[in-house]
Amino acid sequence: MFAQFDLHERLLKALAEFNFTEPTPVQAAAIPLALQGHDLRATARTGSGKTAAFVLPVLHRLLKEERSNSDVRALILLPTRELAQQTLKEVERFARYTFLKAGLITGGEDFKVQAAMLRKIPDVLIGTPGRLIEHLEAGNLVFDDVQVLVLDEADRMLDMGFAENVLRLADICTKRQQTLLFSATTGGVGLREMTGKLLREPKHLMLNAVSELNENVRQQVITADDPGHKERLVHWLLVNESYQKAIIFTNTRAQADRLYGRLVASEIKAFVLHGEKDQKERKLAIDRLKQGGVKVLVATDVAARGLDIDGLDLVINFDMPRSGDEYVHRIGRTGRAGEGGLAISLICHNDWNLMSSVERYLKQRFEKRLIPGLKGHYQGPKNLKASGKAAGTKKKKVEKKKVGEKIARPARNTPKSRPEKPSLVSADGLAPLKRRKPVIEQ
């Protein structure tokens, strides 16, 4: 029960209203440590309730302290505007019975409107690093009173090249008393370095090993010959699979637009989402998918984080992601909150090595699947072991024929000034080559 955490009564009132009763594992592990004031480095699967795990302790801290005429007191950094918007909704939901106010700063919105909001000094500021840096350089941000810094999806921020901006923002939070860092993956060396620079004697929470992140999701692969073959497979899956909502991931904007056009031409209702879409188009696409106006979203990895959509139970990787972490985040869109899901990756010859590396990373083997009537010629690389065995057998046969023979080695070509050395004559009577035709001895 959330009451066991000794949270502020106004937060418990909001939790009760929204039927939050049993905390998830990440909430049960992180909230007590955060309430004690520890810095945290937490890794937990996407959709496991990480947002509440840091929002509730942050709000509790701010409620316990009387606010003077101060500036922003809590800063939450996130990699994408969609995730930032959803975090704002969570903060407002939990803080509805308090005096605490939250503000949002992301790209794609009116800069002057955001500057006016900042002059009202929200207690909690939520934003993406790039736009926050713009406001910092414009003189609109003062972080002298920030007590808590939160980095959510920190691994993704590193992947998107925000490390320098994140560190710069953290450096100006000179009075912060606590730093909370959450991610869905371990993130590698870069994230360990950031943890070392920003966190002081942190508590480490590893709620899930990488290989356990998606046990509720069936993971399948279907081999394909080329992009055209993949498009036919996608159409078959969308027509024949049972699903409420689906996301199809591509690696490029051009491929996303092309596939979207193919689906619309086939009378499949879909939206497309990628980095070239403005904020209005992005919001429309996500809202229509959430509301059920469309069932299919074609997206690049800009949508791999920050989407929390009920009923999303099918993910198709049109292109295999370039890393194991990215694969985890893509298929993390489905199978959320303990629900089941299906993730299907379409594999051409240039995807096979990526797929194999992801399997090794997750320590899993994906289920192979064939679609009736759409089986391609490509079924994966040839069995190297079998071909190696055959080559070994052939080599042995050749060596067997040569038993008892003396094999003449070709003589080296030497300069004329160097005297020729006598050489052996082979068993068949052939003399060694000396830049002329072989001579047959009589």
Image (spheres, grey):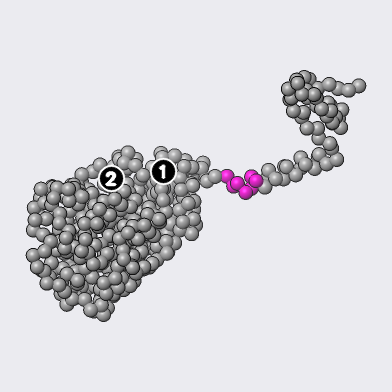
Please state which amino acid type lies under the numbered disc 2.
His
Q: Residue at x 27, y 44 (%)?
A: 275
Position in image of residue 51 (x %, y %) = 26, 64
Horizontal arrangement in the rendering, residue 149 relative to residue 370 (left or right): left
Q: Quadrant of residue 27?
A: bottom left
| Residue picked out by circle 1 | 230
Q: Identify which residue, 217 or 363, lies in the foreground.
A: 363
Position in image of residue 142 (x %, y %) = 15, 56
Residues drawn in magenta: 382-388
Q: Residue at x 16, y 68 (%)?
A: 95
Label 2 crowd bin: few (<14), some (14–19), many (20+), radius 10 Å: many
Give the dominant element type of the magenta stretch: helix, strand or loop. helix
Position in image of residue 294 (x %, y %) = 25, 51
Q: Which mark is residue 274?
A: 2
Position in image of residue 399 (x %, y %) = 77, 41
Q: Secondary structure at mark 1?
A: helix
Horizontal arrangement in the rendering, residue 198 relative to residue 421 (left or right): left
Label 1 crowd bin: few (<14), some (14–19), many (20+), radius 10 Å: many
Q: Identify which residue, 336 or 162, lies in the foreground.
A: 162
Q: Secondary structure at mark 2?
A: loop
Please state which amino acid type lies under the numbered disc 1.
Lys
| Residue 287 in the image: above or below residue 212 | above
Horizontal arrangement in the rendering, residue 257 relative to residue 385 (left or right): left
Instruction: Check if mark 1's residue and mark 2's residue have beta carbons within 8 Å.
Output: no
Task: State the separation of the CA atoms marked 1 and 2.
Answer: 20 Å
